[in-house]
Image (cartoon, rainbow, N blue to C red):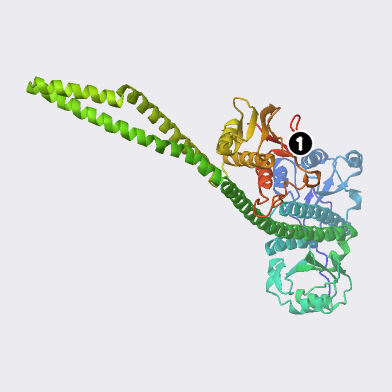
């Protein structure tokens, strides 16, 4: 197959040619007459910024306006791509030689050298140089477009077939080659230019992948024009295909598509090491992008699973907290029943004298009512009799004492019932399953409420030594912190046995509130000190402890951004726990 013959380029002439030109030269002139001086020529150059070659004929007569037009082209229009061939008379050679570099005149010949053959050869030569420079410019633009695409695609969430089509068009444009985009099963997905999409490429694709082993090659450069794939491609394109480049789009060990670039001899001649390296780096960059996207998707799935697992763990932890509360309530039940029974029994015992007082006072009210009726009837004898009866009855029931004792009994009963309500309220708040919402609360009040719940265990057995501020405000969940106090105080009570001393101190330390609870019990042995916060670890006999008390304390304090540690007491010999909680 023969190559297309070299065609004459289109060109422009400024100044009058010394001889009649051949028809071939005249045919490719862009203006019927040579360009002359003034604004018409300036407007013409503005409308033809892509002109490749300009031939100038300079004489002593037109030298001045030609210099003005050349200066206008180079300086005003900033057209530095135009190739200029200058034929000048001997008298003008010196002027144009001085401006040879400033005006970028590529060829300077004497006017006597003018001939159709020389003009033709110079036009072809300068047009070739213009095309080469234009090719380099297009190459730089294609490289910039490719790099811009890679940077933009690197910020997107996925890398799919749409992106492979885009990069295939960019790579085809970079090499000015025909490109075939294939899916992993070698089916045609797209072609560049798009007009090739309708051609039959089955034989070409079959020849390319017959017995092909890519291995780990980033790209495969094929330079043998006799390869079946090149022969088949030449037949389809009706021009010589002497080389090709196969680019697999990989993601780990999976190939997601292929790009087959078909090269003519001219395109193959322009192929250099730099271009091959750019293709390899592009393929590697696409592989990195695809693998990163796949890894990100995998990590996202794992992250979602971990979030679900974390939610389940939080739910389980909440259930354990609540189970520990119920366990504590079970241990408190007998004492709480006794604590409630005392005021209730006292209130019930008050009802017997209250019944007697109410009965006597009801009788007095009835007698006073009868006495009032005798006043209206005027029966002096009956009135005197009733007065005597009333006085005797007042003395018999000791009315003055009854009036005083009634108010005392009512006040005592009210206090007893208030104590019952307080115990029930504290138990309800403690037993209620804690919510995740937080708010400001007073740490001192929280401690005092917890002591109130355990009052029946403390009174008569434990001496409390307290050093508390007026208030200690912090953010958190008051119910959870209350559970911390309950667990620690109850552990101290159990450890101290029948008698003991419990020291409670709350103070500020920088931006933290510090709680110290120390007891006079036997303390915690060294061999278990590192295990006390482990879930389900307990030194109590089976059935007497869940092993969740101190583990719950640790988890609640950690959730509030604090720390709990086992320290040494300054005065008492038993266990001493120190809790640090960030203040508001």
Residue 98's spot in the image, x, y percent? 90, 38
Q: Residue at left 67%, top 29%?
A: 505
Relative placement, left or right, of 27 versus 274 is: left
Rendered-image quadrant of the C terminus: top right
Residue 244's spot in the image, x, y percent? 83, 69
Viewer-proximal residue among 535 and 200: 535
Q: Quick check: 430 above or below 292?
A: above
Q: Secondary structure at mark 1?
A: strand
Q: Residue at left 35%, top 33%?
A: 353
Relative placement, left or right, of 219 versus 577 is: right
Q: Quick check: 5 above or below 339?
A: below
Viewer-proximal residue among 495 and 109: 495
Residue 167 visible, this angle: yes
Rendered-image quadrant of the N terminus: bottom right
Mark 1 Cα within 10 Å, few/some/many (few <14, many 20+)?
few
Residue 87's spot in the image, x, y percent? 87, 48
Q: Which residue is mark 1?
A: 567
Toward which corner of the image does residue 281 lie, by quadrant? bottom right
Residue 434 visible, this angle: no
């Amino acid at each position: 197959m023969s190559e297309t013959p070299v065609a004459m380029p289109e060109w422009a002439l400024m100044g009058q040619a010394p001889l009649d030109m051949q028809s071939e030269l005249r045919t490719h002139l862009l203006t019927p007459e040579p360009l002359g001086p003034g604004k018409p020529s300036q407007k013409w150059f503005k409308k033809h910024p892509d002109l490749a070659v300009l031939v100038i004929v300079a004489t002593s007569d037109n030298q001045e306006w030609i210099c003005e037009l050349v200066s206008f082209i180079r300086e005003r229009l900033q057209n530095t791509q135009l190739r200029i061939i200058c034929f000048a008379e001997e008298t003008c050679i010196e002027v144009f030689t001085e401006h040879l570099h400033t005006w970028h005149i590529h060829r300077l010949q004497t006017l006597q050298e003018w001939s159709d053959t020389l003009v033709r050869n110079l036009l072809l030569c300068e047009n070739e140089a213009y095309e080469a420079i234009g090719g380099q410019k297009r190459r730089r633009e294609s490289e910039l477009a490719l790099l811009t695409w890679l940077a933009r695609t690197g910020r997107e969430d996925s890398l799919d077939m749409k992106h492979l089509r885009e990069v295939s068009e960019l790579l085809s444009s970079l090499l000015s080659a025909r490109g075939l985009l294939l899916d992993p099963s070698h089916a045609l997905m797209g072609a560049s230019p798009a007009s090739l999409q309708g051609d039959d490429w089955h034989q070409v694709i079959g020849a390319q992948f017959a017995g092909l082993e890519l291995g780990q090659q980033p790209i495969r450069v094929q330079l043998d024009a006799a390869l079946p794939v090149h022969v088949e491609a030449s037949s389809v394109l009706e021009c010589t295909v002497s080389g090709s480049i196969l680019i697999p789009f990989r993601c780990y060990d999976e190939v997601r598509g292929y790009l087959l670039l078909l090269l003519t001899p001219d395109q193959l001649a322009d192929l250099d090491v730099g271009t091959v390296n750019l293709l390899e780096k592009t393929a590697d960059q696409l592989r990195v992008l695809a693998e990163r996207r796949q890894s990100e998707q995998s990590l996202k799935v794992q992250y979602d699973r971990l979030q679900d697992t974390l939610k389940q763990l939080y739910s389980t932890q909440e259930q354990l907290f609540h189970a520990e509360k119920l366990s504590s309530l079970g241990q408190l039940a007998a004492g709480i029943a006794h604590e409630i029974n005392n005021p209730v029994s006292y209130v019930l015992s008050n009802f017997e004298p209250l019944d007697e007082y109410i009965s006597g006072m009801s009788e007095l009210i009835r007698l006073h009512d009868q006495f009032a009726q005798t006043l209206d009837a005027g029966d002096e004898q009956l009135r005197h009799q009733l007065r005597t009866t009333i006085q005797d009855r007042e003395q018999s029931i000791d009315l003055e004492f009854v009036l005083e004792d009634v108010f005392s009994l009512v006040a005592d009963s009210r206090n007893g019932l208030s104590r019952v309500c307080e115990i029930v309220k504290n138990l309800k708040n403690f037993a209620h399953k804690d919510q995740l919402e937080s708010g400001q609360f007073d740490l001192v009040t929280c401690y005092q409420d917890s002591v109130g719940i355990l009052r029946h265990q403390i009174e008569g057995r434990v001496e409390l030594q307290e050093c508390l501020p007026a208030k200690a405000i912090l953010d958190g969940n008051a119910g959870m912190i209350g559970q911390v106090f309950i667990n620690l105080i109850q552990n101290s009570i159990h450890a101290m046995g029948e008698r003991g001393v419990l020291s409670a101190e709350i103070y500020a330390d920088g931006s933290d509130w510090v709680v110290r609870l120390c007891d006079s019990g036997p303390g915690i042995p060294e061999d278990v000190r590192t295990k006390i916060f482990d879930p389900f670890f307990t030194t109590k006999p089976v059935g007497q402890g869940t092993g969740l008390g101190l583990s719950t304390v640790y988890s609640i304090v950690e959730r509030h951004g604090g720390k709990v540690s086992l320290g040494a007491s300054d005065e008492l010999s038993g266990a001493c726990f120190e809790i640090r909680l960030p203040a508001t």
